[in-house]
């Protein structure tokens, strides 16, 4: 909602730039999509490494719980 309000203000101030932003947004989103997918994959790998490192400590901290 906040982004839409900012776009409306931009449309009032400079409508050609607002229309250019409206047209260019999907292309920029498609351009940045691989980086977002790569970020999700890297986050998953780092989370698995973190869990693998901390698992023995968590098991030793609670010997009767699994």
Image (cartoon, helix red, strand yellow):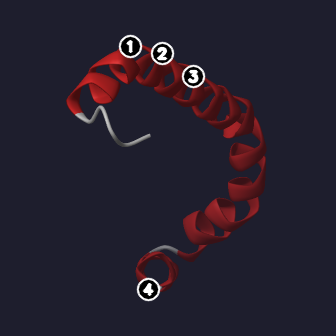
Residue 55 x, y percent position in the rendering: 39, 22
Which residue position is annotated with label 4? 5
Q: Which residue is mark 3?
A: 42
Image position, residue 53 (x, y; %): 38, 13
SS for tag 4? helix
Q: Earlier in the sequence, mark 4 or mark 3?
A: 4
Q: Give the number of the mark in front: 3 or 2.
A: 2
Quick one: label 4 or label 2, which is nearer the N terminus? Answer: 4
The label nearer to you, 4 versus 2, is: 2
Q: Number of numbered discs present?
A: 4
* Residue 45 falls left or right of residue 46: right
Locate residue 1 relative to residue 34 in the image: left or right: left
The C terminus, quarter of image: top left
SS at badge 3: helix
Q: Position of residue 60 (x, y in %)?
A: 26, 23
For residue 53, the mark is 1
CA separation, marks 4 and 3? 34 Å
């Amino acid at each position: 909602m906040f982004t839409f309000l900012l776009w409306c203000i931009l449309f009032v101030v400079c409508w050609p730039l607002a229309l250019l932003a409206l047209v260019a947004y999907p292309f920029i989103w498609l351009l940045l999509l691989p980086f977002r997918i790569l970020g999700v994959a890297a986050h998953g790998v780092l989370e698995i490494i973190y869990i693998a490192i901390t698992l023995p400590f968590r098991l030793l901290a609670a010997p009767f719980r699994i």
